[in-house]
Amino acid sequence: MELLDEIDLKLLTILQENGKLTTKEIAQQVHLSPTPVYERIKRLERDGVIEKYVAIVEAEKVGKSFIVFCQVTLRRHTKEIGNQFVEDIVSLKEVTECYNVSGDYDFLLKILVKDMKHYQSFVINELGLIDNIGSVHSTFVMGTIKHSYAVPI
């Protein structure tokens, strides 16, 4: 992969703000013609710098405004157990993010559900069925102060 220059970084910043802009609109912002801008964006996509384009949905508008951060500790630690846990977690649509972390617990999950009743059902009927979970500690979000999908550039 080539090193990213100032224009590449500017393109990434613009696309993170609005991925629906046309090449012509982006070109005007970076003071280049559309063809080199198009070629640069294609290179960034091909090199995996731009992973994909998505629509960001307002969770509250689709009834998923209850956010829970869930710390999970496994009872035992083997490669097979860890891989199985990851496979199980990836299949749960309520889990929007999962991180393997160091410290007092093994995994940090971000879960989006409708309300406390839905979360209780999720813990009992989905998370609780995953083998080898030793403990689950839930932290409920009372308000979101800052939320961004953008990578700082």
Image (cartoon, rainbow, N blue to C red):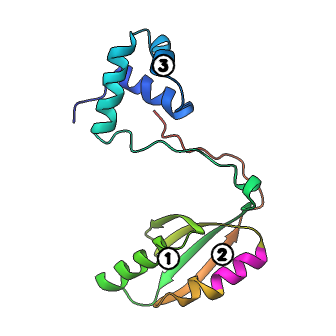
- Label total for image: 3
Labelled pair 1, 2 in contact (Cβ < 8 Å): no
Percent of width and height locating residue 9:
40, 26
Where disc 1 sits, the SS reads: loop
* Residue 32, position as x, y percentages in the image: 39, 10
Magenta segment: 116-123
Q: Quadrant of residue 111?
A: bottom right
> What separation in Å lies between label 2 and label 3 (alpha carbons)?
43 Å
Q: Amino acid at mark 2?
A: Ser
What amino acid does circle 1 point to? Tyr
Which residue is nearer to you in this view: 143 or 66?
66
The three-letter code of the residue at mark 3 reads Ile
Image disc number at residue 61: none
Task: For label 3, count other residues whose C-alpha is less than 10 Å away and answer few (under 14), some (14-19) or many (20+).
Answer: many
Q: Earlier in the sequence, mark 1 or mark 2?
A: 1
Decide whether the magenta segment is chiefly helix, strand or loop.
helix
Tell me: 125 left or right of 120: left
Q: Give the x, y percent position of residue 17.
A: 56, 31
Residue picked out by circle 2: 138
At horizontal 49% and vertical 37% (from top left) the residue drawn is 152
Q: Earlier in the sequence, mark 3 or mark 1?
A: 3
x and y percent of residue 148 in the render?
59, 44
Q: Dot 2, how many residues are within 10 Å of its Cα: few (below 14), some (14-19), or many (20+)?
A: some
| Magenta segment includes 121 | yes
Is residue 99 in view? yes
Q: Which numbered marker is on residue 26? A: 3
Question: In the rendered image of this protein, does residue 9 appear above or below residue 32?
Answer: below
Q: Would residue 78 be visible to someone looking at this image?
A: no
Measured Cα–Cα span from mark 1 to mark 2: 12 Å
The first of marks 2 and 3 along the sequence is 3
Q: Which residue is mark 1?
A: 105
**What distance separates the C-alpha of mark 3 from that of mark 1?**
44 Å
